[in-house]
């Protein structure tokens, strides 16, 4: 008997073993034997699949092979899954399977994180870069500056609306198709905005640029969850940094474009397209797929092709609802969570207030540094760097919170738990929440011609620090608290805060014109001061709130 015949005979014996133990859900071999047999069989895989001619032989050989391989579980199809008989569920081969994105090298995962963060950066730049072009654009289109501010506001509203649709598309097609296609469409609409001849054309194209620009940004959170575990996500904070650097640096870039006598104000759109195009090229050629269900679908398809046995399926292929069913659920669930979940209601309110404060605050730079201190548009843009410096000042807190997380994890293990309560994520917000009202009072009441320009600039540093701390905390808290429902929870929060922020870009300028810098900043400071206790309340009582929640698992 040849080696190949011996090998196939062994596979048929495994088939008989399983047939004799029908109804068992686990592999009939122990892990030690499975690993040893897997090494033997993997080396002879192609020959095994062709040992017998005909569909029957291939099916039987493939069936036994699937159960010898680790990471394949045999079970009966359930009634709602369609079909009947056994299905071979393909999964990762243990905790150290290199196919699992959590086990990819640090270098590879950091590169993926950099690319994903870069997407957030360029769509963030697009959200604010045209805000400094309001004056020349309004003059060209023959409308008021308040009306022209709709170009920024509609982009943000589109951003919020698009967030609802990212989840079901990425869960069906994978992350990469969403990045590649929607970034292209986003750039096409930006080009339309740059070439628009009327304000209605500009408003419409800016809205759809925001709509499609939000989709890859929303998927970015999923990509990071694909490759980093909960502990590692504490350290990997710079995607949040990039998310805020975009809107902050947009006016810096746009200010010098508008001030230039060589190029048109329309270059605020063209330069954004160039930056986005460079990111798109890197994404298209170098970004690997990270969504585990898609990777397992590919693995199952490979096993089907080499064994000619169509019972190999990823769990997602067996259980997945029709696409339009999931799309409808994805659009419905965010509103359900917003209406019924106290955590979502308060966090959404908190972040919406913070975003309203942020974009109204940014509207005030023209009044604070232009009218009061008399600097040019280009230098006004540079003043936004104070906020950027504040964003970087939040970095040391990452290591402080990491130490806190390590201690909390040790306590959890001592109590027999495998994870810490999500409330530990709120340390960032508790460190940063008071900084926002303090910085706004400081900015408002030191913005006088006889007080150095460095005083409001220093206040903006504190503002940037507080903003980043709150968003790192809030997003990680929602992800940990809602787990499988995190995407719907974040979509709800994203929709609410961007729609509110888009509306505030329209009323922000009249606020400063009618009330002045001092009282506008004071009102914003008082509003943000009222919200300061939110992270402390959740830190103390969040576990009790989650215990009464239908969607947030309790401890």
Image (cartoon, helix red, strand yellow):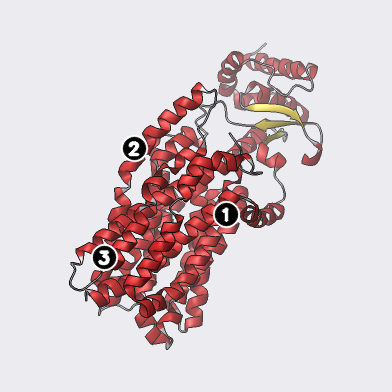
Residue 132 quadrant? bottom left
Of label 3 and label 1, which has the lower sequence position?
1
Distance, label 3 to label 1, CA atoms, is 34 Å
Task: Say left or right for 400 vs 193.
Answer: left
Q: Characterize the local packing of mark 1: few (<14), some (14-19) or many (20 or more) Cα atoms within 10 angstroms.
A: some
The circle on residue 383 is 3
Towards the viewer: 425 or 302:
425
Q: Residue at x 23, y 70 (%)?
A: 379
Mark 2: secondary structure: helix
Q: Residue at x 47, y 84 (%)?
A: 198
Distance, label 2 to label 3, CA atoms, is 29 Å
Towards the viewer: 407 or 35:
407
Of label 2 and label 3, which has the lower sequence position?
3
Give the farthest residue toward the top: 1
- Number of callouts in the render? 3
Residue 191 in the image: x percent, y percent? 44, 72
Residue 14 quadrant? top right
Residue 182 in the image: x percent, y percent? 52, 60
The circle on residue 399 is 2
Residue 492 quadrant? bottom right
Find out whether the residues at labels 2 and 3 contact each other: C-beta distance under 8 Å.
Answer: no
User: In this rendering, is residue 89 above or below 7?
Assistant: below
Residue 471 in the image: x percent, y percent? 43, 51
Q: Residue at x 38, y 55 (%)?
A: 467
Distance, label 2 to label 1, CA atoms, is 30 Å
């Amino acid at each position: 008997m040849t080696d190949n015949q011996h090998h196939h005979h062994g596979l048929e014996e495994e088939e008989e073993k399983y047939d004799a133990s029908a109804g068992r859900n686990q592999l009939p071999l122990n892990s030690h034997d499975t690993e040893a047999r897997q090494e033997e069989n993997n080396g002879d895989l192609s020959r095994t699949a062709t040992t017998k001619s005909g569909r029957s032989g291939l099916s039987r050989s493939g069936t036994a092979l699937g159960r010898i391989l680790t990471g394949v579980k045999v079970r009966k199809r359930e009634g709602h899954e369609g079909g009947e008989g056994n299905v071979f569920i393909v999964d990762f081969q243990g905790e150290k399977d290199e196919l699992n994105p959590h086990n990819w090298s640090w270098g590879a995962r950091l590169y993926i994180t950099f690319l994903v963060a870069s997407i957030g950066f360029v769509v963030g730049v697009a959200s604010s870069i045209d805000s400094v072009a309001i004056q020349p654009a309004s003059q060209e289109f023959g409308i008021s500056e308040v009306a022209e501010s709709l170009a920024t506001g509609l982009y943000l509203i589109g951003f919020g609306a698009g967030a609802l649709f990212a989840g079901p598309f990425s869960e069906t097609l994978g992350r990469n198709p969403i990045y590649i296609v929607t970034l292209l469409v986003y750039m096409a609409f930006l080009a339309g905005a740059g070439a628009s001849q009327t304000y209605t054309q500009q408003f419409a194209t800016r809205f759809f640029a925001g709509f499609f620009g939000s989709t890859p940004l929303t998927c970015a959170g999923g990509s990071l969850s694909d490759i980093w575990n909960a502990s590692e996500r504490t350290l990997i904070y710079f995607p949040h940094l990039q998310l805020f650097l975009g809107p902050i640096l947009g006016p810096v870039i746009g200010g010098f474009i508008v001030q230039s006598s060589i190029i048109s104000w329309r270059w605020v759109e063209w330069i954004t397209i160039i930056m986005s195009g460079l990111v798109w090229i890197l994404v298209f050629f170098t970004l690997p797929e990270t969504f585990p269900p898609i990777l397992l679908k590919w693995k199952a398809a490979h096993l089907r092709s080499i064994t000619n046995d169509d019972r190999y399926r990823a769990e997602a292929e067996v259980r997945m609802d029709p696409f339009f069913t999931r799309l409808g659920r994805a659009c419905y669930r965010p509103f359900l969570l917003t209406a019924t979940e106290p955590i979502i209601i308060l966090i959404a309110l908190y972040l919406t207030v913070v975003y309203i404060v942020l974009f109204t605050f940014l509207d005030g730079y023209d009044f604070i540094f232009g009218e009061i201190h008399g600097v040019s548009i280009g230098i006004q843009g540079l003043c936004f760097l104070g906020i950027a410096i504040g964003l970087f000042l939040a970095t040391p807190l990452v290591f402080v919170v990491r130490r806190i997380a390590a201690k909390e994890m040790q306590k959890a293990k001592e109590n027999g738990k495998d994870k810490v309560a999500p409330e530990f994520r709120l340390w960032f917000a508790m460190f940063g929440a008071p900084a926002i009202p303090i910085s706004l009072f400081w900015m408002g009441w030191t913005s006088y011609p006889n007080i150095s320009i460095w005083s409001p600039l220093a206040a903006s540093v504190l503002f940037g620090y507080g903003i980043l701390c709150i968003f790192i905390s809030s997003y990680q808290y929602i992800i940990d608290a809602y787990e499988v429902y995190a995407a719907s929870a974040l979509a709800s929060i994203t929709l609410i805060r961007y729609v509110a922020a888009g509306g505030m870009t329209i009323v922000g300028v009249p606020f400063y014109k009618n009330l002045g810098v001092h009282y506008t900043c004071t009102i914003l400071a008082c509003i943000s001061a009222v919200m300061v206790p939110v992270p402390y309340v959740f830190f103390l009582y969040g576990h009790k709130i989650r215990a009464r929640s239908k969607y947030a698992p309790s401890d």
